[in-house]
């Protein structure tokens, strides 16, 4: 393939000035990197593909989701396949052979023994995160990488995809999101803290989601239509970045109860998101919260046939009945559609908890 990066100022200027002429001068197949920097190229690529339907002519990569970027009116609908490259999953780093999510829908959780016990089971992995460059650095150098990454997001990537003003408020918003990650997301409440209109908060949050930095997860409910009126939860897609934003290193994740549970739930939910995205089941991810607030389930996955698997996340090394009571109620309510449920904990091995329920060490996600 010919490789073209639109980070190159000369190439970007040429593509922006004459998109059609620029593409005509490329040898196909070609890889165009950072495609969101010249969105007009997509309309010309659409014309080329409509004329010649040969597959694989273009491989387009970028640091923004072109399907949701506001500046991009037409994103090759029906003419392209899309692959989301999240930060590395622990299963990728460990070269796991099986996909945990597919195993969960088959009711076949891994039987883990001898896993690390306590917060050491996840603290170092959560602090390192999944960005390839950041995770290989020592903590001090990783901190610098995350700092510069946030700067580049605001100074370059956001300006590429948006005409929004007050982008200097984005770092403050991102830090607040990190401090509330794995919680319900209410833009009006956040807006009052930042002295921003709730619509502005919602718009900026969408921009951060377009750049794959945050992820909102809808609420699950038995009635499909009712899901749209439930509060979403919000997560930072990389827990290493989240830890940096809240000022937590590996040692603080281990000892500070104010950050431990939130970082662990964010870590597990985003690992499951990566695995679900790469699974054969291709389920949708939700959280569940009873209207009264008495019962909550951290992660609910639902496939196209309506089958569910559900997960709770606990930072303790033991599991007691109250930890999985909501899973039992969900199992009873959904009957045979409830395929399996598990409580992730920091104990040493897999423990059966009853019909279709287990306690799983965190490392079951990549064992």
Image (tube, grey):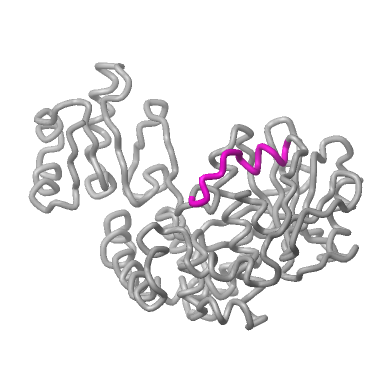
Q: Give the range drawn in magenta.
A: 93-105
Residue 267 versus residue 220 in the image, above or below = below
Viewer-side residue, 268 vs 215: 268
> Residue visible at 60% across and 63% down?
266
Q: What residue is shown at x 79% (from left), y 56% (from top)?
A: 359
Along the horizontal axis of the image, is 282 left or right of 46? right
Q: In this view, does 71 lie above or below 243?
A: above
Outermost residue toward the front in this view:
114
Residue 35, given in percent of the width and then of the height, sits at 26, 44
> Quadrant location of the N terminus?
top left
**Looking at the picture, how far across and down is residue 232, in whole percent?**
64, 58
Magenta span includes 101 = yes
Q: Camera-side residue: 48 or 273?
A: 273
Residue 64 in percent (x, y) is at: 36, 51
Residue 241 falls inside the magenta stretch: no
Along the viewing direction, whichever of 157 and 361 lies nearer the viewer: 361
| Residue 169 figure quarter | bottom left
Residue depicted at x 75% and y 55%: 360
Residue 288 shows up from this direction: no
Q: Residue 156 vs residue 273: left or right?
A: left
Q: Is residue 6 above or below residue 25?
A: below
Q: In this view, does 245 lie to the left or right of 71?
A: right
Report the front residue among 158 and 151: 151
Give the residue at x 8% y 50%: 10
Left or right of 276 on screen, residue 214: left
Number of marks in picture:
0
Q: Can residue 299 be seen in this view?
A: yes
**In x, y percent, where is residue 264?**
63, 67
């Amino acid at each position: 393939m010919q490789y073209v990066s639109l980070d190159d100022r000369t190439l970007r200027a040429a593509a922006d000035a004459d998109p059609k002429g620029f593409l005509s001068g490329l040898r196909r197949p070609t890889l165009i990197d950072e495609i969101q920097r010249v969105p007009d190229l997509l309309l010309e690529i659409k014309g080329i593909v409509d004329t010649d339907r040969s597959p694989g002519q273009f491989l387009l990569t970028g640091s923004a989701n072109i399907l949701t970027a506001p500046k991009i009116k037409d994103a090759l609908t029906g003419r392209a396949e899309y692959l989301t490259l999240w930060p590395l999953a622990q299963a990728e780093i460990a070269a796991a052979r099986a996909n945990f999510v597919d195993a969960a829908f088959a009711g076949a959780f891994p039987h883990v023994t001898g896993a690390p016990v306590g917060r050491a089971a996840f603290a170092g992995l959560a602090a390192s995160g999944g960005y390839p460059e950041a995770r290989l650095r020592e903590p001090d150098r990783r901190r610098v990488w995350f700092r510069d990454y946030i700067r580049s997001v605001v100074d370059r990537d956001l300006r590429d995809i948006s005409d929004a003003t007050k982008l200097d408020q984005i770092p403050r918003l991102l830090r607040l999101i990190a401090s509330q990650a794995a919680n319900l997301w209410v833009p009006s409440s956040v807006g009052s803290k930042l002295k921003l209109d709730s619509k502005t908060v919602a718009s900026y949050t969408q921009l951060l989601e377009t750049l794959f930095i945050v992820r909102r997860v809808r609420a699950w409910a038995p009635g499909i239509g009712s899901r749209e009126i439930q509060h979403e939860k919000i997560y930072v897609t990389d827990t290493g970045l989240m830890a940096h934003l809240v000022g937590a290193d590996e040692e603080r994740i281990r000892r500070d109860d104010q950050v431990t549970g939130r970082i662990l739930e964010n870590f597990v939910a985003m690992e499951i998101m990566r695995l679900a995205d790469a699974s054969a089941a291709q389920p949708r991810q939700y959280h569940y919260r009873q209207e009264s607030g008495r019962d909550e389930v951290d992660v609910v996955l639902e496939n196209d046939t309506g089958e569910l698997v559900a997960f709770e996340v606990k930072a303790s090394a033991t599991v007691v009945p109250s930890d999985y009571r909501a899973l039992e109620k969900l199992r009873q309510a959904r009957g045979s559609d409830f395929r399996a449920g598990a409580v992730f904990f920091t104990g040493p091995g897999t423990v059966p908890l009853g019909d279709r329920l287990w306690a799983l060490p965190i490392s079951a996600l990549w064992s």
